[in-house]
Amino acid sequence: MIQQDIALARPAELAIIVPTFNEAANLELLVDLVDKAIPHIRWELVFVDDDSPDGTAELARTIAKRDSRIRVLRRHNRRGLSTACVEGILATAADYVAVMDSDLQHDERILGLMLDRLKRGDVDLVVGSRYVEGGCVGEWSKGRAAGSMLATRIALKLTRTPISDPMSGFFMIRRDAFMRSLPYLSSMGFKILLDIAASAPQPIKVAEVPYTFRCRQHGESKLNSLVLWEYFELLLDKAIGKYVPVRFLSFALVGGFGLLVHFAVLTTLFVGLGASFGLSQTAATVIAISNNFFLNNMLTYRDQRLRGRALLWGWITFNLVCATGAAANIGVAEWLFGRHTYWVFSAVAGVLVSVVWNYAMSSLFTWRRK
Ligand code: GDD
Ligand code: MN
């Protein structure tokens, strides 16, 4: 292209953000399909890849070398669908942005309709909603279907706007509307659409375009039970994150679960097997602390998960932190009790002090940010 052509080439009006993780087999197909679907639109497509081991980013770069509409944003040492979408959107200048999965499950043929709908100017957001007939829904158990219904209901409360498919990962939004939500985004987990709608200072105006959800042909889904936990955290953050950090809530929840573990072990040993109280209580304490350590490492601090030798060292520091936390707990409770505080309140205060202490100290010594 000669200089003048480059200067005259008009920039894209639609940016399509496509998060990828291990999707090499789908990239070429996706670009082809998008190319065929919206020939009349000036678009660009940004793959946001988190260093996929299968070489997705290199392949995307190869495509980008022959097609200037394709770009790659490769992130290093990062994971996360929501943050990938946000950073992809921020890396473009287009007035309209779409977010779409790379696995061909979202129907690219409605992109044109979505853009037309947005351009009418009366809505900020167009959601591609899965309508079931003929589509790929997979086999849902009763429990999962009920869970999904409940999750959708809560989601609707938070978005304050009727969206029939608030969990959808396929949507198009005006940039100015996105920018209004940006400062309030939680950016946790998978549900970026829900996050954007729930973070809007004014309820966002939404239209929907139905499409048939296709089955994945290549590669595998990244949705696992951790994604459910992340969804739960996103809801918590949207509901009360303003007042209490979600990490702390997660830490406290794990601690609560640890208490159950403690009593399960204690009862088994002391009541069930007739071991001495001292031995049973010691075993219960050690197991409960280890339980809390591993759960926090998996859930609360999954973004900084310790492995190998760091795991052992983390376990040691966590034990020390909890031991000092227990001392603080007993100290505070006794001090209050000695000043005629009702025994239950004294105990609760002691527990609270130790939770806050353990949280603060383990974030300094066990899961220290590098
Ligand atoms: N960059 C990046 N980082 N991309 C990711 C990550 C990540 O950590 N995890 C997943 N992706 C990409 C996948 O490569 C894929 O392109 C897209 O995000 C969706 O992942 P899937 O693993 O295919 O998810 P799904 O099909 O189970 O869930 C989809 O459908 C749900 C229901 O409509 C997603 O669109 C969800 O957001 C949606 O709720
Ligand atoms: Mn998928």
Image (cartoon, rainbow, N blue to C red):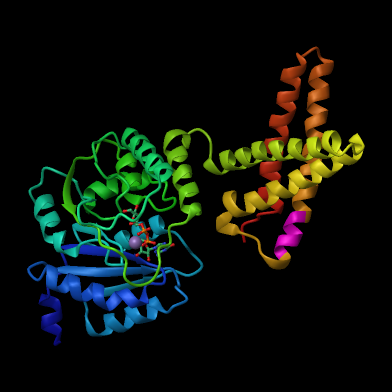
Report which quarter residue 352 is drawn in: top right
- Quarter of the image with the N terminus is bottom left
Residue at 34% over, 35% down: 153
Residue 50 in the figure: left or right of residue 28: right
> Taking 8 as reference, is 139 above or below it?
above
Pick the front one: 304 or 145: 145
Residue at 70% over, 48% down: 291
Q: Indicate the position of residue 111 as horizontal and vertical percent values.
A: 16, 60
Residue at 73% over, 66% down: 309
Pick the front one: 64 or 131: 131
> Taking 348 as reference, is 14 above or below it?
below
Q: Magenta includes 121?
A: no
Magenta residues: mostly which secondary structure?
helix
Instruction: Report whether residue 37 is seen.
Output: yes
The quarter of the image that holds ligand 2 is bottom left
Residue 279 in the figure: left or right of residue 77: right
Q: Which residues are magenta?
A: 310-315
Q: Indicate the position of residue 258 as horizontal and vertical percent values.
A: 69, 40
- Quarter of the image with the C terminus is bottom right
